[in-house]
Image (tube, coloured by chain):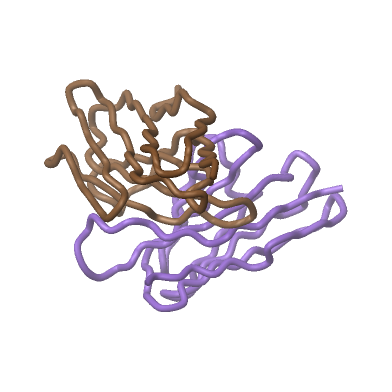
């Protein structure tokens, strides 16, 4: 089945640090990947849609200069949290959908990254 | 505005019985619905989906029912097994699964042996 790998699984760092999270589709190609954030006891909220070879589309209220997204290849998207502060502490998770086949295919998720900013 | 609602934060069921998880939505433009299962420290795993042209989809022990007029869908698991214990998320999208997903807050299912 479709596998999405996300790395690292956990990051603890000081305030002001920039953190890069990688999302890879291991056995399929994905022109589109999605980045979500989940706060405790809340639903997953879409932050941005990452498009291979073009700029990401950010949801309302998400700072694009704060959360830099790069989708350099059909199997890799990265999210960089720049100058992270304690309020950025959250669970970040990516997903991808296979680019071939019927359009109503599900998104497959990575295992997420727990980011803790001290 | 919560477009996808899972009003039961938790559900406890005896092994072998049926588990019914419910989900309501408000956006009539949604035409593709999915259920994901999530274990702690892992990402959501796709379970089953249904498009708006159907009212039922079945896959083994899992069946999803869609009532478009009521804007309601449910996931039935029968028979329930202890390994089914997890958080279940309902999600919806417009224009097929390629578009962004809107998630509910999840329902924690506990299946007791």
What color was chain B assigned in the picture? Answer: brown
Front residue of B14 and A113: B14
Q: How many marks?
A: 0
Front residue of A70 and A29: A29
Q: Residue at x 53, y 48 (%)?
A: A36
Left/right of residue B57 with respect to residue A88 in the rendered view: left
Is A100 above or below relative to B104? below
Q: Residue at x 58, y 66 (%)?
A: A6
Is A11 above or below relative to A101? above
**Quarter of the rendering containing residue B55:** top left
Q: Residue at x 28, y 27 (%)?
A: B72
**Quarter of the rendering containing residue A93:** bottom right
Q: Residue furthest bottom?
A: A27
Quadrant of the snapshot with the N terminus of chain A: bottom left
Q: Residue at x 49, y 44 (%)?
A: A46
Is A29 above or below relative to B90? below
Q: Residue furthest left?
A: B53
Where's residue A26, x and y in %?
46, 77
Where's residue B86, x and y in %?
53, 46
Left/right of residue A63 with respect to residue A117 in the rendered view: left
Where's residue B19, x and y in %?
39, 37
Where's residue B113, x and y in %?
54, 45
What color was chain A assigned in the picture? Answer: purple
């Amino acid at each position: 089945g479709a596998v999405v790998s996300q790395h690292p699984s956990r990051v603890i760092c000081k305030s002001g640090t920039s953190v890069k999270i990688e999302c890879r589709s291991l056995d399929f190609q994905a022109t589109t990947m999605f980045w979500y954030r989940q706060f405790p006891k809340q639903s997953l909220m879409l932050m941005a849609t990452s498009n291979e070879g073009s700029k990401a589309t950010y949801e309302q209220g998400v700072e694009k200069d704060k959360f830099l997204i790069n989708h350099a290849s059909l199997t890799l998207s990265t999210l960089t949290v720049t100058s992270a502060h304690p309020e950025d502490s959250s669970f970040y998770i990516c997903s991808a959908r296979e680019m071939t086949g019927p359009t109503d295919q599900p998104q497959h998720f990575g295992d997420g990254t727990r980011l803790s900013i001290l | 505005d919560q477009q996808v609602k899972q009003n039961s934060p938790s559900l406890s069921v005896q092994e072998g019985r049926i588990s019914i998880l419910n989900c309501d939505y408000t956006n009539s433009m949604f035409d593709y619905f999915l259920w994901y299962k999530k274990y702690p420290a892992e990402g959501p795993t796709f379970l089953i989906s249904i498009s708006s042209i159907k009212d039922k989809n079945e896959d083994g022990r899992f069946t999803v029912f869609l009532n478009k007029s009521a804007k309601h869908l449910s996931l039935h698991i029968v028979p329930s097994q202890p390994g089914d214990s997890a958080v279940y998320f309902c999600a919806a999208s417009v224009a097929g699964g390629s578009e962004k997903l809107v998630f509910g807050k999840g329902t924690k299912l506990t299946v007791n042996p």
